[in-house]
Amino acid sequence: MSASTAPLDRTSLPDAAGHFGRYGGVYVPETLMTALQELEQAYLRAREDPAFREELRHHLKEFAGRPTELCLASRLTEHVGGAKIYLKREDLLHTGAHKINNALAQALLAKRMGKKRIIAETGAGQHGVATAAACAKFGLECVVYMGAHDMERQALNVFRMRLMGAEVRGVEAGQKTLKEAINEAMRDWVTNVRSTHYILGTAYGSHPYPMMVRDFHRVIGQEAREQMLAREGRLPDELVACVGGGSNAIGLFFDFLEEPGIRMFGVEAGGHGIQRGEHAARFAGGRLGVLQGCKTFILQDADGQIELTHSVSAGLDYAAVGPEHAFYRDRGRIEFAYATDDEVLETFQLCSRLEGIIPALESTHALVHGIKRARELAPDKIVLINLSGRGDKDVQQVQKLLTAQNGS
Ligand SMILES: *Cc1c(COP(=O)(O)O)cnc(C)c1O
């Protein structure tokens, strides 16, 4: 079944045009081509520059809180009664999730490029908060585009961004959520491209973003590898991460891709189940198309209209998936599953109760599937789950959902 034994050179991807096999590429208006090429050149130079790497390493440590711990979930392991479950604790990072890895790195890159104005898109607000923090840290002007509907739902994150000096601009178009916010950010970028860098928040969009954002999150897998070797004297048997755009997952997986013995699972949002408009599991209901600069798997109808999506977790609620995931899924190297809202709500409580860790709803999708996998495996096996973020942002929403569920 799995082609995971096939030889693979992960570092050869993407090709010069930004393709991961038939996925990825550059689908933008002509006015942005130069900006993307300039960004790619700047990034490739920075990547090879020891001074940039050292500055980034310094800020990831001092400001963001790296390295994050690798933690044995001992009571969860005992409860499940199968493989040992380890958690990579990205939830311990400053601003509460892995997103700061990328926001910090891109802000540094913008500084290096002489761009003093930053724009970003945000859905739930997590990427906006991380970007606002990085911009405050480096004294950069920051404008965050956010759907008006999301601004209402995530009022606290709007306030956080404003506290840190960001201007949050509400987008009234369409569904007033993430997709429209991205359109508006692109429009701003076209207009202000000389002064402005666009910090995109996931391993998505036009080349070089999927490659660059992946690289900025590779530190997750690099640390996990070392920590697992130090702790257990061997690598894990399986890796599990949730997949919105795919940045925390590819960040964990990348440095294990050439280990043929290790299975990897990306977990998408199953929402209310796999019916049109009720989920965001692109690999369960999507097909090939182009959206917001990128060719990949997309939830769309027969006419190519983007379908509505639903998930209990805003961070996984997007109609398209990062192109590198589509490529590795075709090869059988990364396997995909989904978790439903109900499963997520149950596991959110289980992890909180047994481990004293309240996980982000996004990360809980990975926990749901990781627990299923651990249950299938013998106690001498190891499952490593990426805990991409903490659940503080989600507790009010979960409280409401549980109250409704209990019919009170
Ligand atoms: C944004 C977010 C995600 C989803 O984004 P990816 O790019 O797929 O990683 C997952 N977990 C948390 C905590 C997030 O904030």
Image (cartoon, rainbow, N blue to C red):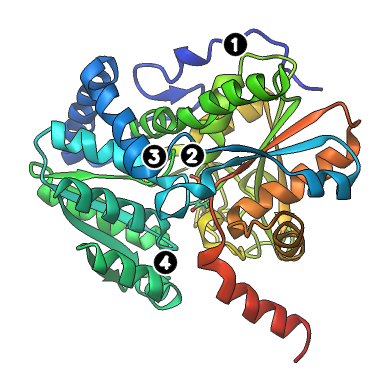
Earlier along the polypeptide chain: callout 2 or callout 4? 4
Q: Could you tell me which residue is drawn at 41 percent across and 27 percent down?
A: 215
Task: Report the disc number at residue 94.
Answer: none
Look at the numbered discs 2 and 3 and tell me whether their residues touch, using CB distance below 8 Å: no
Q: Circle 2 is placed at which residue position?
A: 247
Residue marked by disc 1: 8
Distance CA(mark 2)–CA(mark 4): 20 Å
Disc 4 to disc 1, C-alpha distance: 38 Å
What residue appears at the point 50 percent right and 34 percent down from the top-left corner? 323
Can you tell me whether the CB of the residue at mark 2 lies under 8 Å from the nearest atom of ligand 1?
yes
Of the numbered discs 4 and 3, the one sitting upstream in the chain is 3
Residue found 58% across the figure and 57% down from its top: 360
Q: Nearer the viewer, mark 2 or mark 3?
A: 3
Question: Could you say whether the residue bearing mark 3 is in a helix, strand or loop?
Answer: helix
Is residue 250 depicted above or below 41 in this figure? below
Q: How far is mark 2 from mark 1, CA to CA?
A: 20 Å
Q: Is residue 293 visible?
A: no
Residue type (three-letter) at the residue carrying disc 4 = Thr
Tell whether 67 sits left or right of 384.
left
Residue type beneath disc 2: Ser
Q: What residue type is labelled 1?
A: Leu
